Amino acid sequence: MEKIIDFINVNREKYLDELKALLAIPSISALPEHAGDVKRCAEWCADEMRRIGLQNVRLIATPGNPVVYGDWLGAPGAPTSLFYGHYDVQPVDPLNLWESPPFEATIRDGEIYARGSADDKGQVFMHFKAVEAHLKQNGRLPVNMKFILEGEEEVGSVNLDDFVHAHKGDLHADVVVISDSGMFARGVPSMCYGLRGLVYFQLDLRGSSTDLHSGSFGGAVANPAFVLAQIIAQMKDRGGRVKIPGFYDDVRPLEEWERRAWSQLPFNEKQYKKNFGIPKLFGETGYTTLERTWARPTFEVNGLLSGFTGEGAKTVLPAVSMAKISMRLVPNQDPDKIAALFEAYVRKIAPKTVELKITRMHGGKPWMTSFDNPFVQAAGRAIERGFGRPPVFTREGGSIPVVSTFQEELGVPSVLFGVGLPDENAHAPNEKLDVSNFHNGIIASAYLYDEMAHIAVPA
Ligand code: BES
Ligand code: MN
Ligand code: MN
C-alpha cells in the first residue's frame, strides 16, 4: 500500500485540477435546458473511467439520463464491490448569492467551491483516484469492482429501481460502496448506517376561474391562499407532531443504545444555531436535534406560491395557490402507505370551496443497516488509516432512494462513507468540499479496497 499512498500524495494537486474539469459541467438534472450538459457529464465520467483503467465502460440508456457503467473483474475469489454515486447536481439558484461562479471551481481557505463538489462529484472522484492509484501502481485491484453512476439522483432516481431490477445479474456484488453522505464534523470521520426516506407532493388549489377584485368578491369567495394555509396548519400540532392519522404507526422507535451513542457525539447546539442563523430551534417534543433529524419523520413545506408577491400592494383574490410538500420517512414507514394517508387526510380536511389537485412526485424508502458485518468493519479500518481516527456511526436525515433498492434486489450490505461536512452547503449557494477531506478520502478509499480483499465471500 505504501507505493499507492505515495502516488496519491504526489498527485494531490493534479487531482484538484482534474476534479475542476468535472465540476465545470453543469449537469443539473432538474432543468431540461441542461439535458445536453447532463449527457456530456456522463460521457466525461465514462472517459475518466477508461483513463483510470476500468473496463467495459459504457453508458447504459434509461428512459431518463444514462447510467455510466464500468468494471474491473480480475480478482477471482476476492469480493466484488459495487460502487454507486451520482453525476447530476442540484440547480444553482439563487445565483447572485454565489461568491464564485458555481461551475468554475475555486479554491479558497482549503475548500473547493463549486456546485457538486460535495454532492456528489468530489466524493465519486475520490474513488476514481483510489482505483487509479491501485491500477497504476500494482496493475491490479485487490477486489473486483463494478461502478454505476446515475444522472437522476437529485430528481428522485425515478428510473433506477427498474434499472437495478433489469440488470440484477450484472450488478451482483458482495457489498455496495457509496460516498454521498456526510462526515459528522471536521475531524470526526463517519459511517452512515441509516437514511430517511421521502414522499413528495404538489398541492394545487383553485378558488375561481380567474383572479378577482378583493373588494367586489372578498368575503363571498374562498381565498385559495388562505385555504392552503389552513390545510397546512392542520398538518402538525404545536409540539411538532404530524397530525395525519396513522402517520406514526410504522415508525421504529429509537433504540436506547442509539440515544446514548448520539448523546456522546460532539454536537454543539449553540454553534449549530449560529452557523445557520436560526433564532430558536423547533422540533418534535421529547427528542434532541440529532434524533429529530436522523430518526424521526417530518412534514415540510418546501415551497408556497399564491397571489400578488411583487412590490407594493394589489387588492386581489388569487385564483390559485400551490404548495410543494414533502415528508421525510424513517424505518419502517412505507412511502406508498404514507402517501395514501396524506392524500386521504388532505381530501378530508380540504373544504368544498376550492378545487383540489394532488400530484405525487418522487420519493424513496428509508434505509437502515446493522454494522456488524465485515465490510463495515473493513471500512472502519480504512477510514482510520485515511483520517487518523476511527469513524463514528451516524444516521442521516437525507435520502438516497436506491440504497434500499440495493438491499432488496441484491441482498447485500451497503457501506456509506461520506466526507461532506454539515456546513458545506449541499443544495445551497457556495457548495464546497474540504480539500484535505477530499485527499484523505482518496487514501481511505484506497485502503478500503485493500481491507476488503481478504473478506471471505460465497463463490
Ligand atoms: N447526497 C444526498 C443525500 C444525503 C444528504 C445523504 C445528506 C446524507 C446526508 C442526495 O444527493 C440528495 O440530496 N438526495 C435527495 C433525494 C431526493 C431528491 C429523493 C434528498 O435527500 O433530498
Ligand atoms: Mn448526493
Ligand atoms: Mn443531493
Image (cartoon, grey):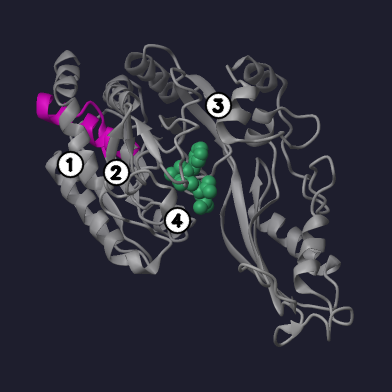
Callout 3 secondary element: strand
How far apart are the two marked residues, 3 and 1, measured between alpha carbons?
Answer: 32 Å
The residue identified by callout 4 is: 93
Mark closest to the chain's N terminus, 4 or 2: 4
The residue identified by callout 3 is: 394
Magenta span includes 7: no
Q: Position of residue 123 (x, y in %)?
A: 34, 36
Q: Amino acid at mark 3?
A: Thr
| Pointer 1 with pointer 2, Cβ within 8 A | yes
- Tell me which segment is drawn in magenta: 123-145
Residue 12 can be seen, yes or no: yes
Q: Amino acid at mark 4?
A: Asp
Mark 2 neighbour density, 10 Å: few (under 14) some (14–19) many (20 or more): many
How far apart are the two marked residues, 4 and 1, measured between alpha carbons?
Answer: 35 Å
Q: Is residue 387 above or below residue 320?
A: above
Dominant secondary structure (helix, strand or loop) of the stretch shown in magenta: helix
- Residue at image position (71%, 25%) is 255
Mark closest to the chain's N terminus, 2 or 3: 2
| Pointer 4 with pointer 3, Cβ within 8 A | no
Q: Position of residue 226 (x, y in %)?
A: 80, 67
Q: Nearer the viewer, residue 289 or 335?
A: 289
Farthest residue toward the front? Answer: 312
Q: Classify the position of the C terminus by image quarter.
A: top left
Q: Position of residue 191 (x, y in %)?
A: 47, 26
The residue identified by callout 1 is: 54
Mark closest to the chain's N terminus, 4 or 1: 1
In this view, the mark in front (4 or 1): 4
Mark 1 neighbour density, 10 Å: few (under 14) some (14–19) many (20 or more): many
The residue identified by callout 2 is: 147
- Residue at image position (71%, 29%) is 254
Q: Indicate the quadrant where residue 449 lies.
A: top left
